[in-house]
Image (cartoon, helix red, strand yellow):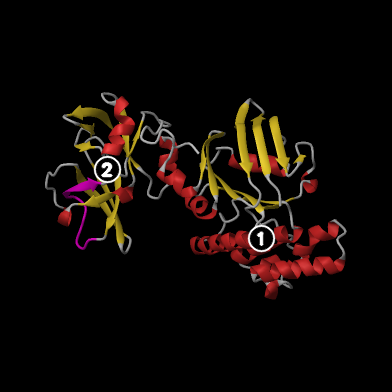
């Protein structure tokens, strides 16, 4: 077990392309940390620098007590699981698991013990005699994970290991990886572009954009207290709705005027963003923070948004409503399922104003309602 520390780590590729910019991060001993962000944000490059597969341009990487910038990948005491499994097709599962240990001249009895222990943990004992071509995608991924386990490394590195699996297998393997971490307690750095995967797996998640860390924190903390509009929009399915408008004072209250409707902010929200009164702002509302008025009617009530319903997607107990206003053509609400509801009609959506966020304008506008939200 070991702590992994990155200090001002930077990677610049040819053409002065900055892939990772002055990244500071501590993955604590036994912690499971997930790097998440859109394609090209620098998360895989960061992982490859920790593994030694990419050289750092600047900065220091420590694994345990050692600075490993100039240490070869095989000597860093890490084990990496790749997206494409990287199994040897001509070897049996047993030999795939044992091969790395054989290269290190590990005694045969110890190799056998570790291989069978890993196979038992992952439930692949009946597969030890098979070749990779005779395995399903999920079985191959278990073998790839088993090959990492037998190394007994200081840290595991996972590079989008579930992206080649179908949706059902991804969910099953996600749960399996979580159980595996609870059992082995090995320091883990995991990369994914799937925000749901990040939320369910990580003790902490690191949200990245353009090579820069946007926010680090526990999954629910980052979800409920995003530091800026990018983080708020990236985490959540369906994503958060954003309404451009203005904060205005009316009587003793602070209101957000969207143009099609106006909403009185809660006392706590008003206190947090009061200094922004009179200025342009963006209201962020998660789909689950909306509800449909009785029978979906348009009643013109206060603190409700009049909309035109478009597509209705039944999901069982819930349904997603795609709606629009004159100013905002794309609004998504996740509401309780209702029979007979269809698009092409006027309705109103009530907003739980205790759950909204107020952002400064711009793609990465600061979350004004949680100014201390950065973890």
Helix, strand or loop at mark 1: helix
Q: Nearer the viewer, residue 282 or 255?
A: 255
Residue 313 is covered by the magenta coloring: no
- Residue 353 is labelled as 2
Where residue 325 sits: x, y (%)? 22, 40
Q: Nearer the viewer, residue 260 or 352?
A: 352
Indicate left or right for 25 with 253 as reference: right
| Magenta residues (range) | 338-351
Residue 341 is covered by the magenta coloring: yes
Asked if the residues shown at circle 1 and circle 2 are in contact, with their CB atoms under 8 angstroms apart, the answer is no
Question: Counting residues from the N terminus, which is met first, the one under dot 1 or under dot 2?
Answer: 1
Give the tally of numbered discs.
Answer: 2
Where residue 247 sits: x, y (%)? 26, 29
Where residue 60 sits: x, y (%)? 71, 34
Image quadrant assignment for residue 71 = top right
Residue matched to label 1: 184
Where residue 210 sits: x, y (%)? 54, 33
Q: Nearer the viewer, residue 195 or 274?
A: 274
C-alpha separation, residue under disc 1 versus residue under disc 2: 43 Å
Q: Residue at x 54, y 54 (%)?
A: 201
């Amino acid at each position: 077990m070991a702590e992994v520390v990155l200090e001002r780590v930077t990677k610049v590729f040819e053409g002065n392309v900055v892939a990772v910019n002055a990244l500071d991060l501590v993955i604590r001993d036994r912690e499971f940390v997930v790097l998440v962000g859109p394609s090209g944000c620098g998360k895989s490059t960061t992982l490859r620098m920790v593994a030694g597969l990419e050289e750092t341009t600047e900065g220091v990487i420590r694994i345990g007590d050692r600075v490993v910038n100039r240490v070869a990948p095989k000597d860093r005491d890490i084990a990496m699981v790749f997206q494409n499994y990287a199994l040897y097709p001509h070897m049996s599962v047993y030999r795939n698991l044992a091969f790395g240990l054989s290269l290190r001249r590990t005694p045969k009895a110890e190799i056998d013990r570790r291989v069978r222990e890993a196979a038992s943990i992952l439930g692949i004992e009946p597969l030890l005699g098979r070749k990779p071509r005779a395995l399903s995608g999920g079985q191959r991924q278990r073998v790839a994970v088993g090959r990492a386990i037998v190394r007994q490394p200081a840290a595991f590195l996972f590079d989008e290991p579930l992206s080649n699996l179908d949706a059902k297998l991804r969910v099953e393997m996600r749960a399996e990886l979580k159980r595996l971490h609870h059992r082995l307690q090995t320091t883990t750095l995991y990369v994914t572009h799937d925000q749901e995967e990040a939320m369910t797996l990580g003790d902490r998640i690191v949200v990245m954009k353009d090579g820069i860390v946007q926010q680090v924190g526990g999954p629910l903390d980052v979800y409920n207290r995003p530091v800026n509009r990018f983080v708020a929009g990236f985490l959540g399915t369906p994503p958060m709705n954003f309404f451009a408008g203005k904060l205005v004072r009316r009587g003793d209250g602070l209101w957000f005027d969207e143009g099609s409707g106006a909403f009185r902010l809660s006392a706590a929200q008003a206190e947090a963003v009061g200094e922004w009164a009179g200025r342009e702002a963006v209201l962020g509302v998660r789909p689950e923070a909306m509800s449909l008025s009785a029978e979906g009617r348009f009643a013109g009530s206060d603190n409700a948004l009049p909309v035109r319903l478009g597509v209705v997607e039944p999901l069982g107990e819930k349904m997603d409503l795609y709606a629009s206003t004159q100013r905002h053509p794309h609004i998504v609400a996740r509401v309780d399922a209702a029979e007979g509801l269809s698009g092409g009609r006027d309705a109103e959506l009530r907003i739980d104003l205790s759950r909204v966020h107020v952002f400064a304008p711009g793609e990465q506008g600061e979350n004004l309602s949680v100014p201390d939200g950065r973890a």
